[in-house]
């Protein structure tokens, strides 16, 4: 494996990928008996690999033995995990904007020759490509599972709404609850215009402020003044996002899974939403069972 491949993750990364893998296997088994063409879409495919987080102040992998040949499966990213699922998907669409990471994705066609003709590699910005894919293609006879796994707040609500609008895509999304959103929600409610714009774009609404903050007038010896209190905690932020998903998807899992760091602080929230009304009941049942802690 190349030395410069992206390095991220830990136990929660493996857990995230295993939950998604279980859903892909169940989904492919069901869809294999249907009359739809179905695809797996990875919007932030990276290199197709993931590598273990390096120990601080040390060189090499945190657990070097996992780099040995027999342990390579543990280092697979979402792209390779999807390609190994059986029954297979009809099409695999991997999107990556970074030119160097994108170049690495070419290896997938060599590594998986039996499905090489059905691997589509897209060097583009994820939001732009997904909106075009969702809004300008006919979805009546097609279905897909889409994995949105950004490093931060790259996915806008316009994209999420376009995905839901197809009524054909099941969405797994890693919501950056701790690494981004909660960090922007200052204690005193004084949020810069730039940060507000980013939160507006992510949630597709401006009412998040009234949900996450309480403003009241107080009178003391110095007269009347206004105070703002932050109400938002991880539970409230997560519930708000789940409720936003419910405004446009046919079904949404009510038990998103927090991805925790070593201090048990949520970094991301693994969420699931189903776009098709007819298949929503079954899809939500499977996803909620997979998401159980």
Image (tube, rainbow, N blue to C red):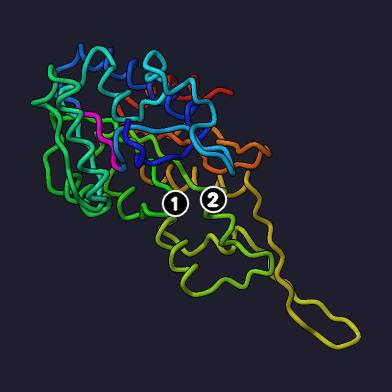
Q: Can you see residue 97?
A: yes
| Residue 179 numbered mark, or none | 2
In the rendered image, is residue 284 in sight? no
Report the residue at 37% width, 54% height from top.
Answer: 154
Left or right side of 147 for 284:
right
Q: What is the x, y in percent for residue 50?
A: 39, 33
- Sequence-wise, the earlier of marks 2 and 1 is 1
> Is residue 40 on the magenta stretch?
yes
Quarter of the rendering containing residue 33: top left
Q: Where 57 falls versus 67 (above or below)?
A: below
Please give the range of residues in magenta.
39-43
Viewed as shown, does residue 41 lie left or right of 11? left
Q: For marks 2 and 1, give the CA distance.
A: 7 Å
Q: Residue furthest left?
A: 117
Q: Are marks 2 and 1 in contact (CB under 8 Å)?
A: yes
Within-10-Å neighbours for mark 2: few <14, some 14–19, many 20+: some
Q: Quadrant of the C terminus?
A: top right
**Label 2 element class:** helix
> Left or right: 174 with respect to 27?
right
- List the residue tagged with mark 1: 152
Name the main secondary structure of what is drawn in magenta. strand
Estimate the x, y position of residue 79 in percent, counting from the top left. Answer: 29, 30
Q: Secondary structure at mark 1?
A: loop
Label total for image: 2
Q: Is residue 252 above or below residue 80?
A: below
For the point 11% across and 39% down, the residue is: 138
Could you tell me which residue is drawn at 32 percent across and 30 percent down? Answer: 1
Q: Residue furthest right?
A: 221
**Residue 209 to residue 48: above or below:** below
**Of 7 and 152, the residue lying toward us:** 7
Is 264 within the magenta? Answer: no
């Amino acid at each position: 494996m190349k030395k410069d491949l992206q390095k991220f993750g830990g136990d929660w990364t493996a857990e995230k990928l295993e939950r998604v893998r279980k859903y892909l296997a169940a989904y492919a088994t069901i869809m294999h008996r249907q009359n739809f063409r179905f695809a797996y879409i990875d919007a932030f495919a990276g290199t197709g690999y993931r590598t273990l987080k390096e120990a601080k102040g040390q060189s090499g992998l945190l657990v070097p033995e996992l780099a040995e040949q027999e342990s390579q499966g543990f280092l697979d990213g979402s792209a390779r995990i999807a390609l190994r699922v059986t029954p297979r998907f009809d099409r695999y669409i991997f999107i990556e904007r970074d030119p160097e990471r994108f170049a690495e994705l070419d290896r997938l066609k060599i590594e998986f020759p039996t499905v090489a003709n059905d691997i589509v590699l897209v060097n583009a910005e994820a939001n732009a490509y997904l909106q075009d894919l969702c809004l300008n293609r006919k979805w009546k006879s097609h279905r897909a599972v889409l994995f949105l796994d950004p490093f931060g707040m790259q996915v806008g609500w316009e994209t999420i709404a376009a995905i839901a609008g197809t009524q054909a895509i099941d969405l797994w999304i890693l919501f950056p609850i701790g690494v981004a959103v909660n960090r922007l929600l200052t204690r005193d409610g004084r949020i810069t215009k730039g940060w507000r714009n980013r939160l507006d774009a992510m949630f597709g609404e401006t009412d998040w402020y009234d949900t996450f903050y309480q403003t009241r007038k107080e009178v003391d010896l110095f007269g009347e003044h206004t105070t703002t209190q932050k109400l938002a905690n991880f539970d409230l932020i997560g519930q708000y996002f789940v409720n936003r998903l419910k405004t446009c998807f046919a079904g949404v899992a009510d038990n998103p899974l927090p991805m925790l760091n070593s201090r048990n602080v949520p970094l991301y929230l693994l969420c699931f939403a189903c776009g098709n009304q007819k298949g929503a009941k079954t899809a939500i049942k499977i996803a909620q069972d997979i998401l159980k802690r």
